[in-house]
């Protein structure tokens, strides 16, 4: 049964969207009188940390930004595109790695941008230190479905209001 406990709230196109404890995306009217599950089972109920949504057009993109940063082992991080009209969903991107996450997913026009981050041990004789480094900035074109790396190297911060890309 769906719970009434929600971790995050998002406002998009005159509605609130929340993630239920069951991992469903729920649309709620702003007065709270109407509530409906729009996409079922987007997240596993055990994925309680770092669940994020990014909206674009008729879709919401779901990802978990830090579930496996400090977990031992290799995991597959993914971005799932969910249709807000019919509830369908499909994975558009996967990254397999140890202590990694998809972060900072943003929508701009028909493009999505995101960063792959990894949690890496820093060599130090005095203490065990860890740092987050990125594998670069990636882009996804919603029209063509193409995805690829835009910038290589460690991306520390991204201001999407100042990012200019070719329109080809």
Image (cartoon, rainbow, N blue to C red):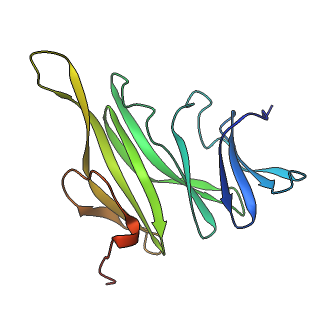
Residue found 41% across the figure and 41% down from its top: 77
Q: Which residue lies furthest to the left in this view?
A: 125
**Quadrant showing the N terminus:** top right
- Quadrant for residue 15, please give it: bottom right
Residue 34 image offset from top left, x and y in percent: 88, 53
Q: Residue furthest right?
A: 33
Q: Is residue 33 left or right of residue 30?
A: right
Q: In this view, does 82 lie to the left or right of 40?
A: left
Q: Viewer-proximal residue, 33 or 139?
A: 33
Residue found 75% across the figure and 66% down from its top: 14
Q: Viewer-proximal residue, 90 or 106?
A: 106
Residue found 69% across the figure and 33% down from its top: 21
Query: Measured along the vertical axis of the image, is residue 99 above or below residue 117?
Result: above
Residue found 45% across the figure and 32% down from its top: 67
Residue 18 image offset from top left, x and y in percent: 69, 46
Query: Measured along the vertical axis of the image, is residue 126 above or below residue 16?
Result: above
**Quadrant showing the C terminus:** bottom left
Q: Which residue lies furthest to the front in this view?
A: 126
Q: Is residue 70 left or right of residue 46?
A: left
Query: Measured along the vertical axis of the image, is residue 92 above or below residue 13?
Result: above
Query: Measured along the vertical axis of the image, is residue 139 above or below residue 134?
Result: below
Q: How many marks?
A: 0
Q: Viewer-proximal residue, 9 or 74?
A: 9
Q: Residue furthest top?
A: 126
Residue 66 image offset from top left, x and y in percent: 43, 36
Residue 20 image offset from top left, x and y in percent: 70, 38
- Quadrant for residue 167, please give it: bottom left
Q: Is residue 22 left or right of residue 1?
A: left
């Amino acid at each position: 049964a769906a719970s009434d406990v929600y971790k995050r709230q998002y406002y998009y196109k005159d509605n609130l969207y929340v993630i239920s404890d069951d991992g469903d995306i729920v649309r709620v009217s702003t007065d709270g009188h109407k509530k409906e599950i729009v996409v079922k089972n987007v997240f596993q109920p055990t994925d309680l940390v770092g669940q994020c949504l990014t909206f674009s057009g008729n879709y919401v993109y779901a990802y978990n930004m830090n579930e496996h940063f400090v977990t031992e082992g290799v995991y597959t991080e993914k971005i799932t595109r969910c249709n807000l009209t019919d509830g369908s969903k499909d994975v558009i991107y996967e990254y397999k790695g140890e202590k990694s996450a998809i972060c900072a997913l943003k929508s701009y026009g028909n493009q999505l941008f995101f960063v792959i981050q990894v949690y890496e041990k820093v060599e130090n004789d005095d203490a065990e230190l860890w740092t987050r480094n990125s594998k670069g900035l990636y882009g996804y074109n919603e029209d063509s479905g193409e995805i690829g790396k835009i910038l290589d190297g460690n991306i520390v911060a991204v201001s999407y209001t100042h990012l200019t890309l070719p329109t080809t």
